[in-house]
Amino acid sequence: MVRYVIKADGSLEVFDRRKVVKTALKLGACQKEANEIARKIENCFQDRIKTKQILKMVFDLLKEYRPYIKHQIDLREAIAMLESKPDFELFVGKLLEAYGYEVEMNKIIEGKCIEHEIDCIAKKNEKNIYVEVKHHMNAHSKTPLDVFLEVYSTWLDLKEGYDMGKTNIYFQEALVVCNTKITEHAAKFAKCRNIKWIAWKSGIFSLENLIEKKKLYPITFLKILDPKTQARLVKARIIFLKELVEKDFNELQKITNLPSRKLNNLISSAKEILEGLK
């Protein structure tokens, strides 16, 4: 009997046990544990269950094998919980730096027609890259064509501004970084106009893979993080769990002005997650 799941966008998809296994593995389970979790979910599966409920079941079952999981939420949702500005822009800037780019944030550059506020300028291998950062609070929405049309228009104006001597920065590439998937029309246009993109599970690099490869998990990965504490950490330019763990405690307390007990709890949870995800 074919059974279906309801995706976040409301569409139906045939239940695939392999996807449950893959999710469990990404959360730190070994192959044996992932198979066992998938088997348990399959055995109690109700037709047309929401994928969000399946994810919750994976988390709940994984706690039996990996206690650290109780401290974290789903990565996709964690990124959506960042504020668009300044949180996600800071996250993207530091992510690019971790991969060897020189980064300048929020620059005003003169084009042929008008000035443009650029989210990020990334430099690597003598190339200047115009980076547009696009964040969605709804992790399951898609970044539309309009974003890429605007980026292309801006990119052209900036290049023509350089030709006219209005700026000394020539942008060889344009890049869109977003926390969602992108629409088919957006992808088609981007390929045609040579605009690169980093998005959820797509693009020149998958955002998810870039994060997991270097363990650059956002602070919102922590279940115990409240909005006020999040704002203080971001103001202190702390955006990764790694930074919480690696930075000197006294320095952290000084720049965040957080109580010792709260800071210790955050660091302890972050350590447990990072060690569990090795």
Image (spheres, helix red, strand yellow):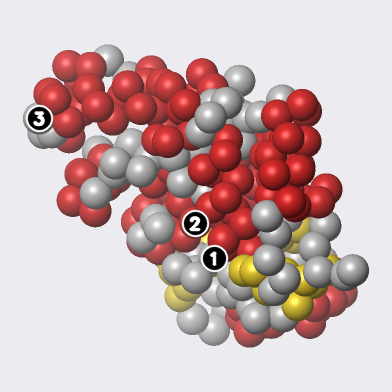
Alpha-carbon distance for marks 3 and 2? 27 Å
User: Which image quadrant is residue 71 in?
Assistant: top left
SS under mark 2 = helix
Residue 153: x and y, percent? Answer: 65, 80
Q: Earlier in the sequence, mark 1 or mark 2?
A: 2
* Residue at horizontal 36 percent and vertical 60 percent from the top: 83
Any part of residue 97 in sight? no
Verify CB contact (< 8 Å) between mark 3 and mark 1: no
Looking at the picture, which amino acid does disc 2 mark? Glu
Q: Residues within 10 Å of mark 3 (few under 14, many from 20)?
A: few
The amino acid beneath tag 3 is Pro
Q: Residues within 10 Å of mark 1 (few under 14, many from 20)?
A: some
The location of residue 140, given as percent across then percent down, is 59, 69
Cβ atoms at labels 1 and 2 below 8 Å apart = yes
Residue behind mark 2: 77
**Front residue of this view, candidates 187 and 110:** 187
In the rendered image, the vertical position of residue 30 relative to residue 221, given as above or below = above
In this image, 49 relative to 192: left or right?
A: left
Q: Residue at x 46, y 51 (%)?
A: 78
Q: Nearer the viewer, residue 2 or 147?
A: 2
Q: Earlier in the sequence, mark 3 or mark 2?
A: 2
In the rendered image, residue 159, in percent from the top left (x then y), is placed at 67, 68
Q: Mark 2 and mark 3 in contact (Cβ < 8 Å)? A: no
Q: Residue at the location (60% across, 45% down)?
A: 58
Name the residue that disc number 3 marks.
259
- How far apart marks 3 and 1 lie (CA) works out to 32 Å
Question: SS of the residue at dot 1?
Answer: loop
